[in-house]
Image (spheres, helix red, strand yellow):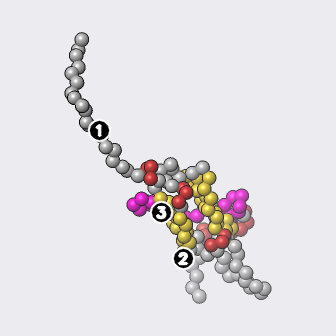
């Protein structure tokens, strides 16, 4: 088996193990994400490979969306000796500040192939709209300078 060794990755992994810098509920690790607007909704993708869907929590409070997930160790049984352990375990978290232009009451979430996708619609009150200008006047008025 051919393995490439990256001394910096090994040092980082060792530091995480020794100092406990993996995510905990009080100090969660960050999760990578992409966000973009598509028509009348914002779409956010979070990479959460290997996470049980039941271990994902979504909360909205005062226009702050909090995403938390926990990757638990896999039961390997007795007599198993790990050779390589690079996959981070623990708690991951991310907060997004939702502006008033988004409808936080209609967020849709889907978890598929290790990616959590959120669809956040733009609020009706924030969508562009045309305002009619009233231009009818009964009769023109004359303005005197006196």
Q: Are marks 3 and 2 in contact (CB under 8 Å)?
A: no
Instruction: Please give left or right for residue 102 compared with residue 137 in the image.
Output: right
Query: Which element is circle 3 on?
Result: strand
**Closer to the camera in the image, 6 or 50:** 50
Q: Residue at x 25, y 32 (%)?
A: 137
Residue 115 belongs to magenta span: no
Residue 20 placement (x, y as % from top left): 72, 64
Q: Residue at x 53, y 65 (%)?
A: 108
Residue 49 seen in render: yes
Where 116 sits versus 103, above or below? below
The magenta span reads 22-43
Q: Which mark is residue 134?
A: 1
Q: Mark 2 Cα within 10 Å, few/some/many (few <14, many 20+)?
A: few
Q: Which mark is residue 113?
A: 2
Where 98 sits versus 68, above or below? above
Extreme residue in the front direction: 138
Q: Mark 1 Cα within 10 Å, few/some/many (few <14, many 20+)?
A: few
Residue 38 belongs to magenta span: yes
Extreme residue in the right direction: 78
Which of the two discs, 3 and 2, labels the residue nearer the N terminus? 3
Please give the residue where the numbered disc 3 appears in the rendered image: 43
Where 48 sits versus 121, above or below? below
Q: Nearer the viewer, mark 1 or mark 3?
A: 1
Residue 65 placement (x, y as % from top left): 58, 56
**Closer to the camera in the image, 5 or 139:** 139
**Closer to the camera in the image, 46 or 105:** 105
Residue 77 placement (x, y as % from top left): 76, 85
Instruction: Please give left or right for residue 30 compared with residue 37 in the image.
Output: right
Which of the two discs, 1 and 3, labels the residue nearer the N terminus? 3
Q: Are marks 1 and 3 in contact (CB under 8 Å)?
A: no
């Amino acid at each position: 088996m051919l393995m490439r060794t990256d001394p910096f990755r090994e040092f980082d992994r060792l530091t995480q193990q020794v100092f406990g810098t993996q995510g905990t509920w009080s100090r969660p690790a960050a999760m990578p994400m992409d966000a973009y607007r598509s028509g009348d909704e914002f779409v956010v993708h979070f990479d959460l490979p290997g996470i049980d869907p039941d271990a994902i929590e979504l909360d909205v409070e005062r226009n702050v969306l909090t995403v938390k997930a926990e990757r638990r160790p896999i039961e390997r049984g007795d007599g198993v000796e790990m050779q390589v352990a690079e996959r981070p375990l623990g708690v991951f978290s991310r907060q997004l500040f939702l502006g008033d232009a988004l409808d936080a009451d209609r967020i849709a979430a889907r978890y598929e192939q290790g990616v959590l996708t959120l669809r956040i619609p733009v609020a009706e009150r924030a969508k562009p709209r045309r305002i009619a200008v009233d231009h009818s006047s009964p009769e023109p008025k004359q303005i005197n300078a006196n």
